[in-house]
Amino acid sequence: MVKKSRLGLYLEDEEIKTQVKIAAARRGLSTTAYCAQAIEQRLRIDGETSRDADRRVILSRVDRFRKEVGPVGITTAELVEEGRRR
């Protein structure tokens, strides 16, 4: 048996709730399953899941972080390759 966790979702707009119900029904899903899939997809896009944490996703996150910190002049991928050569 799979242990399930509960997550409350409150929407300010009744129209969005209706759109979610329609979209879920078109796919033959419950609104819970539809929302769970949408959240999981967004987590993958944001690089927040370990399941999809491949090398490019990780390097991309590090590059974004480094852009926030300031310019270094070399990409993470180049730094990794340089480290491998040493």
Image (spheres, rainbow, N blue to C red):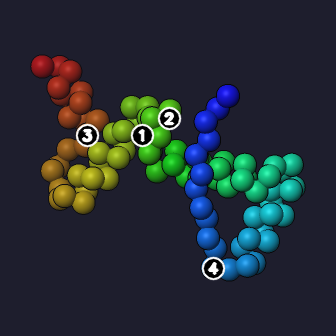
Q: Point out the tag, 1 or 3, that comes first from the N-terminus.
A: 1
* Residue 3 in picture, x, y percent from top left: 61, 36
Cα distance in 3D space between marks 1 and 2:
8 Å
Residue drawn at x 12%, y 19% is 86
Q: Point out the tag, 2 or 4, that comes first from the N-terminus.
A: 4
* As drawn, 30 above or below 54: below
Q: Which residue is mark 2?
A: 52
- Secondary structure beneath disc 2? loop
Amino acid bearing label 1: Val
Residue situated in front as seen by the camera: 42 or 86? 42
Which numbered mark, 2 or 4, is in the foreground of this view? 4
Residue drawn at x 17%, y 49% is 73
Q: Which residue is mark 1?
A: 57
Seen in the image, is 46 located left or right of residue 74? right
Amino acid bearing label 4: Glu
Q: Point out the tag, 4 or 3, that comes first from the N-terminus.
A: 4
Cα distance in 3D space between marks 4 and 3:
41 Å
Q: Point out the tag, 2 or 3, that comes first from the N-terminus.
A: 2
Which numbered mark, 1 or 2, is in the foreground of this view? 2
Binning the other alpha carbons within 10 Å of mark 3 as few (below 14), some (14 to 19) or many (20 upward) gives: some
